[in-house]
């Protein structure tokens, strides 16, 4: 076994992320589409990250591996599994210890997380009963507009005013948006309305845990600049620009736990 | 299947969480089937099952002569499409599930139904059951919402009306003597269950929360006298077990009607142990005996019923909060999970107050909205795991 390689693997509903650390920090990462079997997803993400590290050949060479995400219990070769809430908390804290509140917008759920002074999980709320306000919701909306996700974000940033989207359910929202498009409503205004609708859901969750500065957004949807702008305006606070890809925060947090737990054991 | 033929086998599940019986066991049959083998056995002997919906309907009153009580549940229900026509989705899913099962004929074997005016949703359910199922015997008990001498007196009158109605409809003898006998038998059973429940207070309880919950449900959905030998055998067996040692946290469940043991199993699957509970279908207050006293049996039953700490009561909430905190201390609980059925108004108010009160007392709390039937197991496990991680466990 090689020395000093610690990994975190975040098996999400849409993508699987892996981060490998050594004493210097992150040395490799990967993001791959999730497969049907979480074990296959973890293998694919870890293999891709491992290929980027000289001296690492296979998963068994890692000193310690922590699994997280919805598929965390289905990674048989992980030393431990830790909930994604704790991993996002420690991951965000490690990027900036002043971060106290995190909104994690994943493929199929939305979470607000409150962080203790030491980076541990303080409190959380989750919205996981429907796709509203999640990555799946944005995918559906982009499909309606016939654009890529990144273009959808840019479109919303061009708008001077927004058309409110009243439906919370992604199926009804899709129908509402189609009706607006049929009425020749400017797409950018609809797009901004969608961003504000999701930002509102994030705001509601944040208020339930109590917003404390600094605030960060993690998960794949954190790359949606239009959503970040809408939430910034809504909570009237700046949102921290993370030092690493926000989609990797869960895996990064898991890798930090791997490093800690390996030393402890 | 005769109740005393059960073979008690210990199975070591993953990570030393104990499970007491093989899959084909009697408890699983009882918990998963309304018209289970014990119910059939009793009915074959000429006895009459009376369904009830709320712990404010006294079981003992339905345990006289050839009657036996069955708390109504809807195991493994997959949807409520028929009931949804009459009850919108903002009505609690327990009520909708009962109506669905009723409309689909699952309760046709019952001799009668006894409701209580528990809440507005249950009142509506009672109306709709009468409208669409048309049972031959229905009674709606009117237990008032506070526990005073006046409301107890009212409850005694209510119980008398019910017992007279049962006597005349089913031609059964309900008098002081038969009621006193029913109370004695009820208390004996409760004491056996209490012995098992008390084992959960140990540092290394020899019974998991899932197992205990199955037992609690079984004791409410089958004739107690037919279940008694099984419960006694289990008690003796459980006492001989090694306790569970490698759990991460001791949790207590607080909330509304909980009929699916898989809910607790999912919680325990992340490595914690449910050692206590505080809800109407659980051990507190379910395992309180009906005390002796100077009063007649109806009044003893009324006093026992009205003293139950339930969110439907309008009494000062402090007593209920203190009762929960006392249970937390008694069972050495690390954290509390408040599970509430969506759209349950009494529980919404109670759950919020309870969370604040327990947090102020230094007890970590996780609040979970749920449907009657367990769904989203993965999300539940994530929440519970994160909860115990936030406790540093």
Image (cartoon, grey):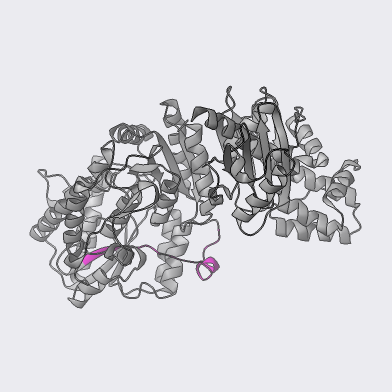
Q: Tell me the quarter of the image containing the N terminus of chain B.
A: bottom left
Side of B167 where B79 appears, left or right? right
Q: Is B142 situated above or below B255?
A: below
Side of A203 where A69 appears, left or right? left
**Residue A139 position within the rendered picture, expressed as x and y whole percent measured from the top left:** 77, 54
- Say whether residue B86 is magenta: yes
Q: Out of A167 and A215, give the one closest to the viewer.
A: A215
**Residue B98 position within the rendered picture, expressed as x and y whole percent measured from the top left:** 42, 64
Q: Please say whether residue B23 is visible from this viewpoint.
A: yes
Q: Out of B227 and A91, give the one closest to the viewer.
A: A91
Main secondary structure found in the magenta portion: loop
Stretch of the chain drawn in magenta: B68-89
Q: Tell me the quarter of the image containing the C terminus of chain B.
A: top left
Q: Quadrant of residue B205?
A: top left
Q: Residue furthest left?
A: B177
Q: Residue at x 44, y 74 (%)?
A: B104
Q: Please say whether residue A204 is visible from this viewpoint.
A: no
Q: Is B307 situated above or below B189?
A: above
Q: Out of A67 and B319, give the one closest to the viewer.
A: A67
**Residue B366 position within the rendered picture, expressed as x and y whole percent measured from the top left:** 48, 39
Q: Residue at x 47, y 31 (%)?
A: B391
**Residue A60 position within the rendered picture, expressed as x and y whole percent measured from the top left:** 59, 44
- Say whether residue A231 is magenta: no
Q: Quadrant of residue A184?
A: bottom right
Count every numbered label the image shows and give the total: 0
Q: Out of A62 and A172, give the one closest to the viewer.
A: A62
Q: Is B64 situated above or below B278?
A: below
Q: Quadrant of residue A229?
A: top right
């Amino acid at each position: 076994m090689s020395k000093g390689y610690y990994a975190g693997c975040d098996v999400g509903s849409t993508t699987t992320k892996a981060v490998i650390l050594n004493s210097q920090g992150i040395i490799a990462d990967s993001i791959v589409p999730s497969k049907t079997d979480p074990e296959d997803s973890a293998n694919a993400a870890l293999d891709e990250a491992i290929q980027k590290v000289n001296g690492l050949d296979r998963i068994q060479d890692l000193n310690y591996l922590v699994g997280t995400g919805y598929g965390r219990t289905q990674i048989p070769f992980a030393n431990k599994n830790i909930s994604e809430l704790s991993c996002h908390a420690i991951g965000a804290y490690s990027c900036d210890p002043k971060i106290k509140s995190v909104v994690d917008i994943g493929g199929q759920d939305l979470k607000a997380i409150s962080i203790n002074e030491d980076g541990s999980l303080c409190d959380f709320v989750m919205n996981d009963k429907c796709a509203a306000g999640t990555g799946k919701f944005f995918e559906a909306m982009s499909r309606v507009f016939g654009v890529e996700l990144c273009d959808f974000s840019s479109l919303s940033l061009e708008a001077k005013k927004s058309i409110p989207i009243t439906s919370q359910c992604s199926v009804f929202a899709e129908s509402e948006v189609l009706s607006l498009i049929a009425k020749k409503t400017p797409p950018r205004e609809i797009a901004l309305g969608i961003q504000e609708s999701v930002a509102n859901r994030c705001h509601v969750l944040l208020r339930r845990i109590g917003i404390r500065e600094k605030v960060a957004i993690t998960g794949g949807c954190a790359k949606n600049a239009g959503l970040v702008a809408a939430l910034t305006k809504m909570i009237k606070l700046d949102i921290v620009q993370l030092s690493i890809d926000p989609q990797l925060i869960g895996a990064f947090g898991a890798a930090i736990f791997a490093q800690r737990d390996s030393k402890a054991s | 299947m005769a109740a005393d033929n059960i073979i008690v086998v210990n199975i070591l599940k993953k990570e030393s969480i104990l499970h007491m019986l093989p899959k084909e066991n009697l408890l699983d049959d009882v918990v998963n089937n309304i018209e289970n083998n014990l119910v059939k056995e009793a009915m074959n002997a000429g006895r009459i099952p009376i369904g009830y919906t709320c712990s404010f309907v006294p079981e003992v009153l339905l345990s006289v002569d050839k009657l036996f009580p069955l708390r109504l549940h809807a195991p493994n229900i997959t949807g409520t499409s028929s009931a949804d026509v009459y009850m919108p989705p903002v009505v609690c899913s327990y009520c909708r599930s009962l109506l669905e099962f009723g409309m689909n004929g699952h309760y046709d074997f019952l001799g009668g139904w006894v409701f209580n005016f528990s809440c507005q949703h249950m009142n509506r359910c009672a109306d709709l059951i009468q409208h669409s199922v048309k049972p031959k015997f229905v009674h709606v008990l009117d237990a008032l919402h506070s526990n005073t001498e006046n409301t107890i007196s009212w409850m005694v009158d209510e119980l008398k009306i019910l017992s007279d109605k049962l006597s005349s409809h089913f031609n059964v003898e309900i008098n002081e003597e038969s009621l006193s006998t029913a109370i004695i038998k009820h208390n004996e059973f409760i004491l056996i269950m209490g012995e098992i429940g008390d084992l959960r207070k140990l540092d290394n309880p020899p019974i998991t929360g899932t197992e205990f919950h199955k037992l609690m449900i079984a004791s409410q959905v089958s004739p107690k006298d037919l279940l008694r030998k099984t419960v006694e055998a289990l008690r003796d067996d459980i006492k001989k077990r090694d306790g569970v040692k490698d759990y991460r946290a001791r949790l207590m469940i607080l909330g509304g009607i909980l009929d699916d043991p898989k809910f607790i199993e999912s919680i325990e699957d992340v490595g914690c142990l449910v050692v206590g509970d505080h809800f109407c279908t659980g051990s507190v207050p379910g395992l309180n005996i009906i005390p002796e006293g100077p009063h007649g049996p109806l009044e003893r039953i009324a006093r026992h019923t009205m003293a139950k700490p339930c969110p439907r009561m309008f009494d000062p909430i402090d007593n209920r909060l203190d009762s929960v905190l006392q249970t937390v201390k008694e069972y050495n609980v690390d954290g509390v999970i408040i599970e509430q059925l969506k759209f349950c108004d009494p529980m919404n108010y109670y759950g919020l107050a309870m969370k604040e009160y327990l947090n102020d007392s230094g007890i970590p709390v996780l609040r979970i909205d749920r449907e009657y039937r367990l769904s989203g197991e993965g999300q539940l496990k994530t929440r519970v795991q994160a909860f115990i991680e936030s406790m540093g466990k």
